[in-house]
């Protein structure tokens, strides 16, 4: 089934709703999903919130209506957090009342076997017949700040990432919340919308790819956690990805035989052969990281470049030629090893360039520093040395990106170092990625850089992955523009 | 040269000194390395501290002596933080005064070329002729709590790990401090002694392997960061490792051609061919992690097992058969994929076992939970469900280790969950490794577990690596006992 115009409209209602209504609110159990959703939206978000309870009454001052047709307005979304048979009844009511979108939290559908599959078929028929944008069943819903958050986990138990350019679509609610939310927050990666598709009876990854590519203007990067494509829709997904102006990133679970078996108990779907999958994804300009960490590093880089500001404008070109600047020889060595692994290259400095760099740093460091690439300024480094060398490297055109390994341990490195580097780099517009150890007391330095859109990573490997991310995107941008020399 | 008995004695003076003396204290520059070392040892550590300054005087109330022979006692260690030519003079004084050990912070030796190489040869001759345990030159020294810390970086700039079973030996001071110290602290891995060997003119990795294996009783695990073995000593190192009762772990920088080039500017040594190296290390029972993260995970596991307490006694046997317990289907899938990658196996449950587990959890979760391996208790999980399932799994003998993927987001998981699991596991003595997201607010749960010697990791991958670490050690223990069936 292709995306009808009505469902497209209704997806907008799902992600940009003015009002929502919740069924499945327990008056006894404060931790019931329906009740958590009702209260968090009422008290923390902007959407108008209504609740349904067969006996009416109220919860924390919010009036509960006995039936959907008693509400003062037709809500944009009905969130259903009740058993599967009653759920079907409510979806029929959405059809009758022209409620355009619904989020079904509960399970008991295709994932539990034959009986559930039949239920799901009924659900699909009603939804498709009436163009209802149904999310789920068996999902944790949608988070679209500042409007709506149907995730039934208490807000204080999770960490919300900042607002940004990345749309997240996940076949697993747990992965959405944990891998995406928590780790996005930790890494300062911005999210536009997060969607848990669960059994994807109606809304699936392909529809969402189309929606976020073509309709949503806040999103520039679309990331998926999938355990396989929805039946017969892989081709459509790939074609949409190839046409999209956004950057598309997929991460798959269930790629081994063992993992596949595990998915059967989860969302009744299977991953394909991983090698064939990888090569297909590459061919359709989809970025496909090898690990969770790589995924997060890529998304951080793509989110920063989406800000279209210096030093990482969106059209930045990186073929892989870098300069490594370190204050520790060992870190330089480990970074060099890593470059090789990611197909990147340390540019060679001429003797003149080495002499120039030798002359612009302090006399003590000068005697023991090394000006190969990696450059090692040693523990005798001063703030001004780092500043001077970065200024110098910025003017060397064949260096596409600087990798700065900044250990703030040497005694003469000051608290101002982050701001000094940020100012220099912002003026020069030279792409740079930084490694700074993840230690609370260095957050002042880290924030100085990140406020100026310079991404900071907490391992050498991630800093190298970040450059690799830029290289991958340069390739895709070129291919999309028809510059096929990349494929040689 | 083999380790003479005198140097062996003198290594003990280096690591367990009663007194130390520092030369190279600047009265003007509060950040001079000598001054930092003087003050941090006087104010933060237990060793008796003396300082030398040609003009005498005092710094922060510490009397400075004009010459070494004026000190009230012969110190165990002379820390030299001055230029290379004067350094040689002071090493000669160590010989004359019978000072048994010295740490040379400064560079200007083999790492700078021919002139420096000659200096280093002179240094070596004096040291070996007089059995002086010289560390360095071009190193950041030794950290042996609670006695001594010659690391010239201000203490407040680094993070010190807790006291424990791991001895660290690093060819790079930066890697020692950053990879080891900071990340050990972050992961709660305990250190016995940390040593930066720099140019390893006299004391090298092989001597230290012998010392920590045979002499030091606090150390059970010996970890190395190397960029190659010292000339002609690889064989001796390997043989010592094979005989050692401790667990030996090596991590190499400079394993690619590019990385090797980088090492030349660093400590004038080269890594060998990595594949040959890996296979030699395996043959000599040396554990050789593939990444920094794997290294840290292994060390965390080995440190915990060194406590010889439940559930991870030192002789724990893990061939690789695990049970995965999750509250998120997606996490179970990703963990299954990862098991495969590390050569581990999810045991199969019988129908009876599945039925038993079905019966002992709450009715809501029961309907949607999955009892394959991975077990997914879903977001409807209660504390008691986790407790009951762990109790049940603990009694299944063919499960050697449980991997618990504990997302604390489901609303009914309480703050007590960590302690409840810890008590259950401590009683049952079943090995378990946990994944809990790295979020400050969950530290109460994390600490409940770690206080009971249950290691907690912050990614699924690390939890799986932890079991892999146990499997590797089981292999080595068996081989050392002559049980060669492992090699089939």
Image: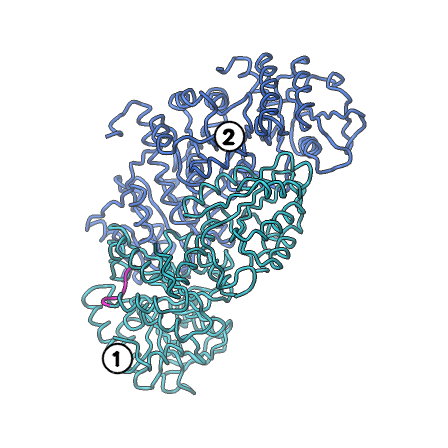
Chain colours: A cyan, B blue
Provide residue A268's location: percent of width, then percent of height: 25, 62
Mark 1 against mark 2, which lies toward the viewer? 2
Q: Residue at x 68, y 13 (%)?
A: B97
Whether labels 1 and 2 belong to a single chain: the reply is: no
Specify few, some or many for label 1: CA neighbours under 10 Å numbering under 14, 14-19, or 20 or more.
Answer: some
Residue A227 versus residue B323: which sits nearer the camera? A227
Work out whether B319 lies above or below A255.
above
Residue A418 visible in image: yes
Mark 2 Cα shell of 10 Å, populated few (<14), some (14-19), many (≥20): many
Residue B252 sits in quarter:
top left
Q: Which chain letter goes with mark 2?
A: B
Judged left or right of residue B403, residue B37 is right
- Give the magenta range: A227-232
Would you name the residue on which mark 2 appears?
B169
Q: Name above or below for residue A302 compared with residue B14.
A: below
Q: Nearer the viewer, residue A119 or B427?
A: A119
Apparent side of residue B120 relative to residue A124 in the rendered image (left or right): right
Q: Kindly report the secondary structure that dominates the magenta region of the rendered protein.
A: loop
Q: Residue at 53% x, 42% y: name it.
A: A373
Q: Chain of mark 1?
A: A
User: Whole-percent x and y of residue A270?
Assistant: 25, 59
Q: Which mark is residue A160?
A: none
Left or right side of B276 for A125? left
Instruction: Report x, y in % for residue B213.
Output: 46, 23
Residue A126 shows which numbered tag?
Answer: 1
Q: Quadrant of residue A226?
A: bottom left
């Amino acid at each position: 089934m292709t995306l009808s115009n009505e469902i497209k409209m209704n997806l907008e209602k799902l992600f940009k709703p003015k009002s929502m209504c919740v069924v499945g609110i327990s008056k006894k159990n404060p931790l019931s999903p329906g009740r958590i959703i009702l209260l968090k939206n009422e008290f923390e978000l902007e959407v108008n919130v209504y609740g349904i309870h067969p006996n009416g009454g109220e919860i924390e001052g919010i009036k509960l209506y006995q039936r959907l047709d008693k509400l003062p307005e037709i809500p944009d979304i009905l969130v259903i957090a009740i058993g599967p048979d009653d759920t079907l009844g409510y979806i029929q009511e959405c059809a009758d009342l022209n409620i355009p979108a619904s989020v079904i939290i509960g399970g008991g559908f295709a994932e539990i076997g034959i009986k559930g599959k039949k239920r799901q078929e009924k659900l699909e028929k009603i939804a498709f017949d009436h163009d209802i944008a149904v999310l789920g069943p068996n999902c944790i819903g949608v988070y679209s700040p500042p409007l709506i958050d149907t995730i039934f986990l208490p807000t204080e138990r999770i960490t919300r990432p900042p607002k940004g350019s990345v749309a997240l679509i996940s076949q697993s609610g747990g992965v959405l919340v944990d891998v995406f939310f928590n780790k996005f927050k930790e890494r300062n990666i911005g999210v536009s919308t997060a969607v848990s598709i669960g059994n994807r009876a109606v809304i699936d990854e392909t529809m969402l790819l189309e929606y976020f590519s073509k309709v949503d203007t806040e999103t520039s990067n679309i990331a998926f956690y999938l355990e396989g494509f929805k039946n017969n829709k892989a081709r459509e997904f790939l074609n949409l990805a190839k046409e999209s102006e956004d950057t598309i990133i997929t991460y798959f679970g269930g790629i081994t035989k063992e993992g596949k078996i595990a998915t059967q108990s989860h969302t009744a779907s299977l991953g394909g052969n991983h090698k064939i999958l990888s090569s297909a994804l590459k061919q359709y300009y989809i970025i496909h990281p090898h690990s969770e960490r790589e995924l997060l590093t890529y998304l951080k880089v793509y989110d920063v470049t989406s800000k279209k500001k210096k030093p990482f404008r969106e059209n930045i070109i990186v073929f892989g030629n870098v300069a490594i600047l370190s204050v520790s020889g060992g870190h330089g060595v480990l970074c060099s090893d890593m470059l090789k692994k990611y197909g990147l290259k340390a540019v060679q400095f001429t003797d003149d360039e080495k002499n120039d760099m030798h002359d612009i740093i302090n006399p003590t460091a000068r005697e023991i520093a090394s000006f190969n690439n990696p450059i090692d300024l040693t523990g005798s480094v001063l703030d001004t040395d780092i500043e001077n060398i970065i200024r110098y490297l910025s003017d060397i055109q064949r260096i596409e990106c600087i990798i700065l390994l900044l250990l703030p341990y040497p005694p003469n490195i000051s608290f101002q170092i982050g701001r000094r580097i940020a100012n220099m780099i912002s003026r020069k517009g030279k792409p740079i990625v930084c490694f700074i150890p993840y230690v609370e007391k260095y957050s002042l330095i880290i924030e100085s850089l990140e406020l100026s859109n310079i991404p900071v990573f907490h391992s050498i490997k991630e800093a190298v992955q970040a450059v690799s991310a830029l290289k991958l995107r340069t390739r895709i941008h070129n291919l999309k523009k028809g510059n096929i020399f990349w494929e040689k």
